Amino acid sequence: MPVVEIAGKKIDVNEEGFLTQYDQWSEEIAKELAKQIDITLTDAHWNIIKFMRDDFKVRGESATSRRVQTVGGVPIKEQFALFPKKPAKKMAYIAGLPKPKGCV
Amino acid sequence: MKRKVIVLGGGTAGTMVVNKLHKRLDSKNWSITIVDKDNEHIYQPGLLLLPFGVYEADELVKERDHFFPAGIEYIQSEIEKVDPHTNTVYLADGKTLVYDQLVIATGTTPRPDQTEGMEDPAIWHKSVFDFFTLAGSIVLKDALDKFQGGRFVVHISEMPIKCPVAPLEFAFLADAYFNERKMRDKVEIIYVTPLEGAFTKPVCSKQLGFMLKDRNISLEPDFVIEHIDAETKTMVSMDEREIPFDLLVTIPVNMGADFIGRSGLGDDLNYIPVNKETFLSREFANIFALGDASDIPASKAGSVAHFAVDMFAENFVDYVNGRPMTHNFDGHTNCFIESGNGKGLLIDFNYKVEPLTGMFPLPIVGPFPLLKESRFNHMGKLAFRWIYWNLLLKGRWIPLPSLMSMAGKKQVVKKEEVGANASS
């Protein structure tokens, strides 16, 4: 697995750049990851990212858009506004969690 | 006094559970009860193939109680709710059942009512179809036979869904079917998914990425449906993309049973949070959830239910006798994927190992090649119906390992690649 340097730290990522170690994530890293996909993090973004981090810790799975809506309280439309085009993937990416995937 | 185990749901998982527990629990000390709302057991893999004329409806349905062992109690009733604090199941007619151990195996169900406009009477089962219900599959066959051409859309509303490869198989089979009817040039096939693509795992994506292009099936990824406009027959996404259709085959939102929500036992989609290795509820020490009803991060599929129940049956006996559970489930999944024209693919994977190439179950001789089109895999899929009815449901031995084996699989040598691109 590749290792990259983000915000001055050596970080394990997969082929697509998603973090593979939950504990290597930090807010500094999140800012860098967001910058790479042209997102400037506001409080509304942080609210979702923190929900995703906490939820993953309990469930071991990246929250879906539905879950961010029903449990995290952010409507899917708003998720699209904050993380354009691919909210589920981008939210997981910045939160240092695995991307949503199917079985193949 | 006898202890009581109640199993809710008599589908693939629940039926296997009662058969395996009946063999393992002494009837002097234990009673087993199973509850289901009806007595029709449907062979669900057949619902994909019925619209293409492979099966007739009567080949896919048998009576549930035919597969239950003698000596257990079967109650046919809807379930109102479960009170996990008093260990009570409330049935729809007001009767109550008290359990020592509860196994919930009530599966997952397509819910077209969850998407605005999907069930509009102007389009539902007229130009919009599901196929994971017997009624949907039967009317879809008729619609396919009458289809004269136009925009044919295969669509997934939201993950997770029952049998996640089924919509892809449906697209492949539709391509082959329209070719056979010599009208493929009159049909535009579009595959619409909320994921980033039809294939999302690295090896699959590399091995199978060509399959849509080769069949001239176009792909619309990252499409999160907001509503369907019945008048213009158009799907509209959250980011206001529009996909018009002449015939839409959709996988509606899938949800666990409503009584799970009413009982406060489920997550936002009524799936029960469990330990993914033992299926024990994360909240209640005498509730297990098996099959599609749980929230484990594995495919909602019969093979997962089968391997999971194998492990559960051993664990359960240990657990109720105060011993630690040692048969940890690894997420083993094994699926035949129809690719059309009498061929199929096979995937075999678990929580940690993604689907890989190679041979299954034996190295080199197989006979089933992994992640590769082959007639053997198609024959394997067809042969499975007999195995299902005659061996699997009754908990008889099947020569497949419950835990995944790396034998015959080609491991991936990782390239040192650096890339960070979530927008691709």
Image (spheres, coloured by chain):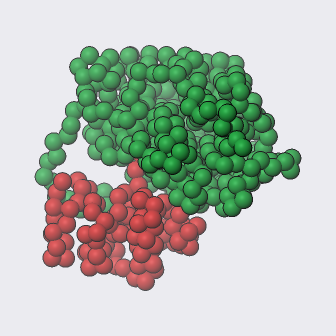
Please identify the residue farthest to the right as the structure is shown: B93
Q: Residue at x 16, y 61 (%)?
A: A3
**Residue B352 at x, y percent in the picture:** 32, 46
Please tell me which residue lies in front, B250 or B71. B71
- Which colour denotes chain B? green
Q: Which residue is drawn at 39% across and 60% down?
A: A89
- Quadrant in which residue B378 is drawn: top left
Quadrant in the picture for the N terminus of chain B: top right
Please identify the residue farthest to the left as the structure is shown: B416
Tell how many labels.
0
Quadrant in the picture for the C terminus of chain B: bottom left
Residue B92 appears in the picture as rendered: yes
**What chain is colored red?**
A
**Residue B369 at x, y percent in the picture:** 31, 23
Q: In this view, does B274 lie to the left or right of B147?
A: left
**Residue A34 at x, y percent in the picture:** 31, 73
Please tell me which residue lies in front, B305 or B85. B85
The image shows residue A14, relative to residue B379, as above or below, that is: below
- Quadrant in which residue B251 is drawn: top right
**Residue B85 at x, y percent in the picture:** 69, 61
- Quadrant in which residue B126 is drawn: top right
Q: Residue at x 41, y 32 (%)?
A: B402
Q: Which residue is drawn at 51% across and 67% down?
A: A68
The image shows residue A21, relative to residue B191, as above or below, that is: below
The image shows residue B140, relative to residue A43, as above or below, that is: above
